[in-house]
Amino acid sequence: MATKKSKRYRVVFTRDEDGWWVAQVPKLDGCHTQGRSIAQARERIREAMDLFDVPRTARLEEVIDLGKLTAKVEHARQTREHVDELARASKAETARVATRLAKAGFSRRDVGELLGVSFQRVQQLVGR
């Protein structure tokens, strides 16, 4: 039995000269709205799409046009994602090394000193 895929709609958000966010669905001629925030415009575009009999299950592909700032925002997001990934890897590696040091007979305080974390954090990482 084949499953029905939900239809996808592209929604373009831009700011007007008064600072309002304008949301429009290019595929639906005349389907547009505005809001003071992106979240409000997002909510209102769904309401506008209801008038075009678009089901709420339809997936929206959002494009937020910030002009020249679009690339800067994307770079900042990618940088944050990379830093988050490094933090997860660092946490996992710290836990592995702390466990190995503890199994090798080092005290929790020495393990903390060696890894630059508190002995309480070592205790959390390696348990009893």
Image (cartoon, rainbow, N blue to C red):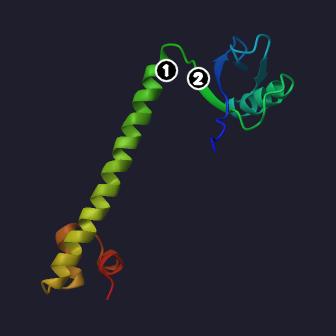
Q: Where is residue 8 in the image (x, y as percent from the top left)?
A: 64, 27
How far is disc 1 from disc 2 in space, using C-alphas? 8 Å
| Lateral position of residue 24 relative to residue 120, left or right | right
Q: Mark 2 points at which residue?
A: 64
In the foreground, 5 or 48: 5
Answer whether labels 1 and 2 touch (C-beta < 8 Å). Answer: yes
Rendered-image quadrant of the N terminus: top right
Residue at the spot 57% in from the left edge and 18% down from the top edge: 65
Q: Which mark is residue 32?
A: none
The image quadrant of residue 123 is: bottom left
Asked where in the image residue 23 lies, by quadrant, the reply is: top right
The disc labelled 1 sits on which kind of residue? Thr
- Residue denoted by label 1: 70
Query: Along the line of sight, which residue is nearer the eye, 107 or 102?
Result: 102
Residue 9 placement (x, y as % from top left)? 66, 24
Between 4 and 37, the one nearer to me in the picture: 4
Name the residue furthest front. 1
User: Around disc 2, counting alpha carbons within 10 Å, would you say few (fewer than 14), some (14 to 19), or many (20 or more)?
Assistant: some
Q: Is residue 112 toward the left or the right of residue 66 in the image? A: left
Identify which residue is drawn at 32% across, 75% down: 125
Furthest-right residue in this view: 51
Q: Is residue 66 left or right of residue 25?
A: left
